[in-house]
Amino acid sequence: MSTSYLYHAQGIRGYKCQKTERTAETEIYYTISKASHCPCPKCDSIETSVVKTGKTRDILGLFVGLKKTILRVATRRIICQDCGASIQEPICFCSDSYVRHTKWAARFAIVLRADMSIRAVAQYTGMNWETVKEIEEDWLMKKWLFSEVRFFRGFLRQCLT
Ligand SMILES: [Zn+2]
């Protein structure tokens, strides 16, 4: 049930929910990756082993009603036999390795920004002001790059015909 909820309501695939904790204001989902084998993020070798670190990382998800959602992810390390790297397993539902919110939470913040100030979005989503600002900057940069690429493609087509 909780694993299905993570998929349908939070956009999280490939992770299993081990247990749930509830407080008056927060839902905490203890999750772990289902992948038994991961390629090396550095050299793409499949000669790797995955080890649990015993540590967790808290990721902010979408709110459930008025409750904050925390995904407490059990972190693992990928150890590569080919290049010797020991790298933390990337979390696929986060946009980058250092962020502390899901891709869906970032998308929700962008939707809210159409009608709300950065400060109001930060208060509503539980993120800090800087995080909301960075999410918006990343989104604007992707939007701008996409429009530039589309313009350049159109320009090339006109030149080639
Ligand atoms: Zn490697």
Image (tube, rainbow, N blue to C red):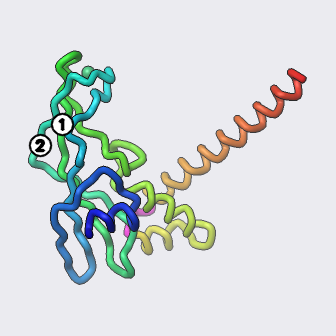
Residue 73 covered by magenta stretch: no
Q: Which comes before the other along the chain, label 2 or label 1? A: 2
Which residue is under mark 2? 53
- Image label count: 2
**Ligand 1 image-quadrant field:** top left
> Is residue 137 shown left or right of residue 21?
right
User: Disc 1 marks which residue?
Assistant: 77
Q: Residue at x 27, y 63 (%)?
A: 3
At which x and y percent is residue 148?
Answer: 72, 37
Query: In terms of secondary structure, what is the magenta stretch mainly?
Result: loop
Q: Residue at x 50, y 73 (%)?
A: 120
Residue 108 located left or right of residue 14 = right
Would residue 96 appear left or right of 112 to someone viewing this image?
left
**Quadrant in which residue 58 is drawn:** bottom left
Asked if the residues shown at circle 2 and circle 1 are in contact, with their CB atoms under 8 angstroms apart, the answer is yes
- Which quadrant of the view contains residue 114? bottom right
Residue under the image location 76 percent in, 31 percent down: 153
Residue 61 tag number: none
Q: Is residue 72 visible?
A: no
Rounded to the nearest whole Å, what is the CA distance between mark 2 and mark 1?
7 Å
Amino acid type assigned to the residue bearing label 1 in the image: Arg
Quarter the C terminus occupies: top right
> Quick one: SS at disc 1?
strand
Q: Secondary structure at mark 2?
A: strand
